[in-house]
């Protein structure tokens, strides 16, 4: 017979969400995970669930029995793994978020991950900014109309790949000779991006007789929206044709939008608004990544 949880067994009090129910340890843990992931984007849910799975496989015990030493051990395990520094950081941050959430709703009696800090990230932004000539070559050498329009929109609109993949024709609205895209971005925030006339004309030519609810960028095989991985392959193929050796991702075109527009004098608040950055500090990173001047020129060298 499967053991049933009492209100004490999973660290629950009478005020906790499932204190009055009899759930198996696995069911109670899955309920906690579902509540934690609720309302997050599909991409975040997938990433966070993978992080939780890695952690639970490492500790091999229910969450309510996990100790600080085990969270610290997991951090060390990640540091010694072959995972990238960014994956290590996001994985540990997700685990900390789960433990904090469990404690906040009183399913976990303590937040044992509170004192564990994710590793600081090395800022490699400058290594991921394409030149204007490289971007122009990627677009010019793309022979397929859909893919060329996609590259131009990633760069010209500064869209995240998830935002681009989710676009439907109803999200695009004409404004005179140009148009705008209503984008559903990170953190479930909506913003409107004004599109240059060249991009609008390319998108208009691409639409044909497509219905309002049809994907703007449609998979030719499945018929639905292009997936993130499909867009990644298209971007990497375009970079290869342009003679770029680096492993270029769709996000590099967003980086290029920010850097190039700032270099050409765009107000930083306008760039922040277009890209949907919640903080001006995020946008200002692009100023520091490729400075246009230095105090070194004032030195007697």
Image (spheres, rainbow, N blue to C red):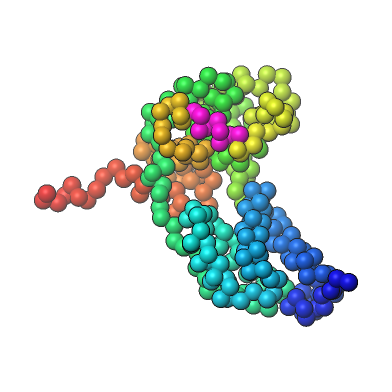
Quarter of the picture holding the N terminus: bottom right
Residue 165 position in % (x across, y down):
63, 36
Q: Residue at x 67, y 29 (%)?
A: 219
From where the camera sits, is residue 153 visible? no
The residue lying toward the viewer, choosing from 151 and 143, is 143
Seen in the image, is 134 located left or right of residue 200?
Answer: left
Number of marks present in the image shown = 0
Q: Place residue 146 in its image quadrant.
A: top right
Q: Place residue 56 in its image quadrant.
A: bottom right
Seen in the image, is 47 located left or right of residue 210?
Answer: left
Seen in the image, is 31 located left or right of residue 275?
Answer: right
From where the camera sits, is residue 77 visible? yes
The residue lying toward the viewer, choosing from 74 and 216, is 74
93 in magenta: no
> Which SS type dominates the magenta stretch?
helix
Indicate whether 17 appears above or below 247: below
Q: Residue at x 53, y 71 (%)?
A: 72
Indicate whether 79 appears above or below 154: below
Q: Residue furthest right?
A: 1
Residue 236 position in % (x across, y down):
50, 33
Range of magenta residues: 230-238
Residue 220 position in % (x across, y down):
68, 25
Q: Residue at x 47, y 37 (%)?
A: 248
Residue 196 position in % (x across, y down):
51, 28
Q: Residue at x 58, y 73 (%)?
A: 70
């Amino acid at each position: 017979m499967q053991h049933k949880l009492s209100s004490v067994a999973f660290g629950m009090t009478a005020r906790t969400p499932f204190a009055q129910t009899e759930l198996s340890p696995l069911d109670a843990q899955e309920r906690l995970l579902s509540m934690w992931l609720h309302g997050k984007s599909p991409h975040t849910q997938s990433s966070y669930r993978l992080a939780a799975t890695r952690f639970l496989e490492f500790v091999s015990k229910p969450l309510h029995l996990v100790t600080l030493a085990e969270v610290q051990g997991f951090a060390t395990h990640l540091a010694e793994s072959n995972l990238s520094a960014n994956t290590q950081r996001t994985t540990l941050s997700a685990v900390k978020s789960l433990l904090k959430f469990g404690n906040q709703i009183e399913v976990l009696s303590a937040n044992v991950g509170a004192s564990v800090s994710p590793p600081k990230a090395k800022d490699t932004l400058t290594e991921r900014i394409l030149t204007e000539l490289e971007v122009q070559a990627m677009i010019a050498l793309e022979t397929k109309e859909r893919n060329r329009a996609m590259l131009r929109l990633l760069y010209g609109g500064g869209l995240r790949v998830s935002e681009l993949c989710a676009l439907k024709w109803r999200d695009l609205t004409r404004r005179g000779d140009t148009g705008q895209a209503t984008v559903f971005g990170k953190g479930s925030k909506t913003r409107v991006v004004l599109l240059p006339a060249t991009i609008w004309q390319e998108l208009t030519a691409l639409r044909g007789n497509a219905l309002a609810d049809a994907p703007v960028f449609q998979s030719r095989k499945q018929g639905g929206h292009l997936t993130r991985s499909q867009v990644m392959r298209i971007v990497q193929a375009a970079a290869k044709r342009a003679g770029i050796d680096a492993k270029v991702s769709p996000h590099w075109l967003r980086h290029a939008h920010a850097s190039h527009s700032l270099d050409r004098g765009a107000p930083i608040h306008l760039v922040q608004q277009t890209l949907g950055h919640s903080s001006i500090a995020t946008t200002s990173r692009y100023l520091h990544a490729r400075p246009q001047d230095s105090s070194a020129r004032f030195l007697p060298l």
